Image (tube, rainbow, N blue to C red):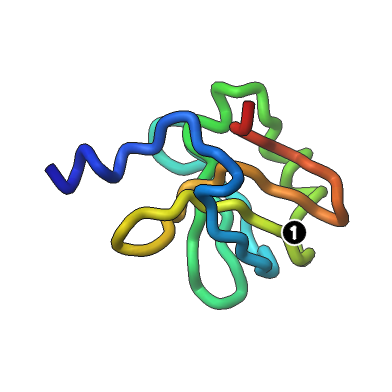
Amino acid sequence: MTLVSCIIYNPKPEQCAIVYTKIKEVREGTSFDIVLDDTNGDSFYINRGLEQELNLDALKRSVLNKTVRLHLPKFWIGSSEHIAQIEVNNDTLFTEFQ
């Protein structure tokens, strides 16, 4: 039951926590994910980002050593590490919002 309640499907902006954080590393994760590590030691990911035509090198140029705004879906146990939307300087680099 808990696992089913943590599946992220069609996230909405009002269902997300907003986190501002500085990115220190961008790397390929498992299952074509793109992982962003911040200066606080936290990691966030774009689910199957490499399958969604995101370019790892271009993303690195856009976010490394910059403060980003992340939209992270919320659960009853807290917010996820799944990135539903990422912005830098009011530019949306990736979004799952429809």
In this picture, is 14 found above or below 67?
A: above
Residue designated by label 1: 64
| Residue under the point 51% across and 55% down | 44
In this picture, is 84 found above or below 39?
A: above
Number of residues whose C-alpha sits closer than 10 Å to that of mark 1, classed few (under 14), some (14–19) or many (20 or more):
some
Is residue 66 or residue 83 the one in the foreground? 83
Report whether 75 appears left or right of 33: left
Point out the residue furthest to the bottom here. Answer: 40
Report whether 52 appears left or right of 73: right
In this picture, is 24 found above or below 44?
A: below
In this picture, is 19 found above or below 32?
A: below
Is residue 56 or residue 63 the one in the foreground? 63
Is residue 78 or residue 87 the one in the foreground? 78
Residue 23 sits in quarter: bottom right
Is residue 98 or residue 86 the one in the foreground? 98
x and y percent of residue 5 in the render?
25, 43
Quadrant where the C terminus lies? top right
Quadrant where the N terminus lies? top left
Q: Amino acid at mark 1?
A: Leu
Q: Dot 1: what SS?
A: loop
Residue 56 sits in quarter: top right
The total of numbered circles placed on residues is 1
| Residue under the point 64% across and 43% down | 85
Report whether 71 appears left or right of 55: left
| Residue under the point 50% across and 48% down | 15
| Residue under the point 56% across and 32% down | 49
x and y percent of residue 37 in the render?
56, 62
